Amino acid sequence: MKLRIILMCIMLSLLMVPSAFALGGNVSGHVTDANSQPLAGISVQFYDTSGTTITKAGLTDSAGDYSVTSMTAGSYKVIFYGNNGSGAPYVQKWYNGASSLATATAITVTNGATTSGIGATMGGVASPKVDLGTATNGAAGAVVKIPVTITTGGAAISSVGVKITFDPNKFDSVSFRDPNDPTMTSATARGAAAIAASKDLSAENIVVSTDGTVATYTVGVLSQSNTNVIGDGVLLNLYCTLAASATSGPLTLANLADASDPSGSAITVAGTAGTISFPDLVKPVVDTFVVPATATSTIVNLTMTASDNIGVTGYLITESATAPLADDSGWSSTVLNKYIFGTEGAKTIYAWAKDAAGNVSLSKSASVTITLPDVAPPTVSAFTMPVTATTLVVDVSTFTATDTVGVTGYLITESVTPPAASAIGWTSTAPTSFTFSAQGARTAYAWAKDAAGNVSASKSASVTISLPDAVAPSVTAFAIPANGTSLTVTVSTFTATDNIAVTGYLVTESSTAPTAATAGWSGTAPASYAVTGNVPQGAATSVTLYGWAKDAAGNVSASSSATVTLTLPDTTKPVVVAFSIPATANTAAVNITTLTATDNLAVTGYLLTESATAPAASDSGWTSIPSTSYTFTGLPQGVATAKTLYAWAKDAAGNVSLSSSASVTITLTGPSLVFNPTVLANGTATKNPALNYAGTATGTGTVTLTITNNEQPVTFTFANGDFNAAILLISGENRLVATATDDNGTTTDTRVITLNTDLADLTVTSPANGSFTKNSLVDLVGTVGAPQSTTVTVKLNDEAEQTATLVGDTFIMQLNLVAGPNTIVVTATDTVSGAHTQTVGITSDGSAPDLAVTSPTLPFFTAKQSAVLTGTASDDITTPTVTVTVDGVALETQPVVTAGAFSATIALPTVKEYAVVVTVTDQSGNSSAVSGKITRKDPSGNATDGVSAPTIVDVQKALQFALGTATPTADELTNMDVAPLVSSKPAPDGVIDGGDALVILEKVVGTVTW
């Protein structure tokens, strides 16, 4: 029974085995080459994801397909490798194109399912190789290590066979050692074949040829890595013990390797041989080095030999005892037979040799004394002379020369042929001048020689010699227009001649002869000249120009002159310097407070407009003097209206100034009715029956005025806005009514003045009514007559009333006036009759008036019998008066100030100096003065001003007047009537004749003076 149960269990277990396999998964794929052709024989391996175990493997069929079955479910990484048709290995590929296990894409295998499409496209051919390294410390008895490295080149290699061949006579032993265990305790190379710790030349795996010249050593290496693939790196280290006979190298170890992949397929492996080199430590030796004791050249022949244990590779000669380096420049691969010195003298040179190992010999030295013959001629380093000269003896600006030994002689010739060292004329120092044989274009040649008789090459210098030309040119004709309107004057004619040639032309405004170096000369006669002197605009001004010529020698001609009268157009605009109007007004007619303008010549017109647009000089409305008022139109009644007024000025040339503007706010409220300050105020009392009732009534349009006293008409005068009525008051109240009417309305002034003859007497003795003072402080002095008077009050302008102190019947009070008009109201009040009022007007002006003499500029010189003095005078408050004294005597006819200007004619009856004083005084007594000298001189003959020195032009004019070809002006007659001379002084006879022309000429040349 038990046996049956056991058998049944065995059967059941056998039945269950296929079911267990059926639970695994499958993987399939397709592999092609780069041309999409199927590849057969490609190995496919599956690693677990840790990369430590190859779990499955497969192989592609002829269609490039593979299938691996019954794989345990899980994740795997897949690699493809194999050889191509020629046996060369493909570069191994990880699935999905990864380059390593670490970066490969994992696939998932599921029980009972097939994971398909796990394929690859194999790329290029791998290039594996095994290389033997090199050792450089070879020596007899030395142990050297040569690494054996593998580069897989992408191939999957699982085993490598390394075979080396070498000369057994050069080695005592050779052995391969595991690079991971150089002590050989494990005796494995990459964990593969067992390798003994050391192999002598009779050991196993080492085969020696029958002739004993070649030995072969073979060892195999298997991969022991997780991936069953050998990676790049050191496979083995080859240790070699060199035999005693191995004293020089290099020694060569041939290398022939083979390999196979994990599937056992052979892989072709390239390889390189190993070498062992021996250091060369033996220096070469310079055996012989001979130079002559003396030489006459810097190139010295020599003899040199050297030897080395291996071979001399370089030769060098230096002038320094310091050993050169093997890599210094200058080494020669062949033996040297000469050396070139830089200079002569006692010299020592050193011979050196080197070998291929860079060993440099000790030096061998030799000495030579070099004495060079002097065959080098001197060099003329610099030789210069002026490019031009005016004498045959020409200075030498520079003459320098150098020589290797020393310059012993200098010579200058006119010949390009080199002179002999023995020629006449050599000097020990450089000459400072040279005498040429003739004038003209000449060339001089400078030479130098030395003590050996060497003569230099020449250096030349050229000079043009022009012997002095002492003849000045002559201006044959010079003419300009008689009149002009521009500072640029046309030169109508300008010709000149010279014995050689005219080289320059010049026009000046001065009769003083220019030098040949004066700026402004031109090579041709100028066609025009720009006047630089002061020529005012708008005024005819006589200008004399002088024509000059020069030649190449610097000779300057006498001048030829001509005169032009220039009248320049006036282009300067006037300037409105001041313009003001009141800020407010209640009439359409607004007073012009200030309107002044200036011009370079004269202001000829003034204009007021309400437009900012500049008027034309031809527009209507211009006035020759400033307007004193302006009437606006279209103003509303009773409405404040802002208006701007523009002031303009023009001159005779039609130049219109820029404007100056001022604004006013106008409120039309009827006419202006203003009483003089002395008219008694409303409500005052007086004991004086005579009342001066006066003032102004102005307005828009026609202004009418009525005056009544107690409703009875009063007779008065009314002209130009000023009215005046002499009213005889009646005893008691007098009701005075003044009514002014204009186009805008009516203005009425009513004041009640009481006549009481019993009032206290009141008299203001100082200041006088209507007076002027230059002081700001004034004493008010007066008296009261009745003993019953008790108080006196004083009111100045709009200030508060003050009480004056009476001393008996007299009162004195000091008042501080304002600049300009002041009104003083004095009221005496007694205990019986009441108040008695008196009004006093006074103007205070403490500033001196302004004064300027505008013409002529003092001091002034003239030949005329009179001079016109003009100027300006003004005062801010009062009207100024101008007085003129000459030599302390006032003029019989004093000037009158009109619109701020004045003019006075001063008689100059005799030739002398006159002291002139101009004084301006205002109504307050302030004054200013200007003083100066006006001198009348004898006429000089100068047509322009009569006092300057005459010129030849004035002589020409006098001749024209004498011949009747021109007529003198009154000024020219005064200035040029100089003949006859009496006591060496001009005694004018009223005409200009030949005598005047002769006297003027004599004054020009200096034969007469006065």
Image (spheres, rainbow, N blue to C red):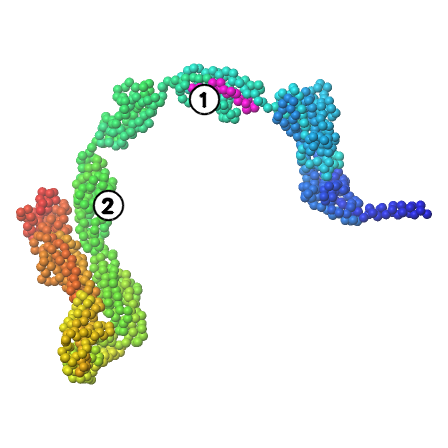
For the question of whether residue 602 can be seen, the reply is yes
Q: Give x and y (percent) for residue 1007.
A: 9, 42
Q: Residue furthest left?
A: 983
Q: Mark 2: which amino acid?
A: Ala
Q: Mark 1 points at which residue?
A: 319
Say whether residue 363 is magenta: yes
Q: Mark 1: which amino acid?
A: Glu
Q: Quadrant of residue 818?
A: bottom left
Q: Which mark is residue 29?
A: none
Front residue (pair 993, 861): 861
Q: Which residue lies furthest to the right in this view?
A: 1
Up the image or down, 354 lies above or below 793; here it is above
Q: Which residue is rendered at x = 63% and y = 23% of the image?
A: 139
Asked whether, in this view, residue 573 is left or right of residue 767, the answer is: right
Q: Residue 527 carries which label?
A: 2
In magenta, the rendered stretch is 347-365
Q: Which residue is rendered at x = 25% and y = 57% of the image?
A: 572
Mark 2 and 1 residues: CB-CB less than 8 Å, in contact?
no
At mark 2, the secondary structure is loop
- Between the C-alphas of marks 2 and 1, the distance is 79 Å
Q: Which residue lies furthest to the front in this view?
A: 807
Asked whether, in this view, residue 638 is left or right of residue 166, the answer is: left
Q: Residues within 10 Å of mark 2 (few under 14, many from 20)?
A: few
Q: Give x and y (percent) for residue 430.
A: 28, 25
Nearer to us: label 2 or label 1: 1
Q: Which residue is rendered at x = 42% and y = 19% of the image?
A: 347
Q: Give x and y (percent) for residue 422.
A: 28, 18
Up the image or down, 608 lies above or below 394; here it is below
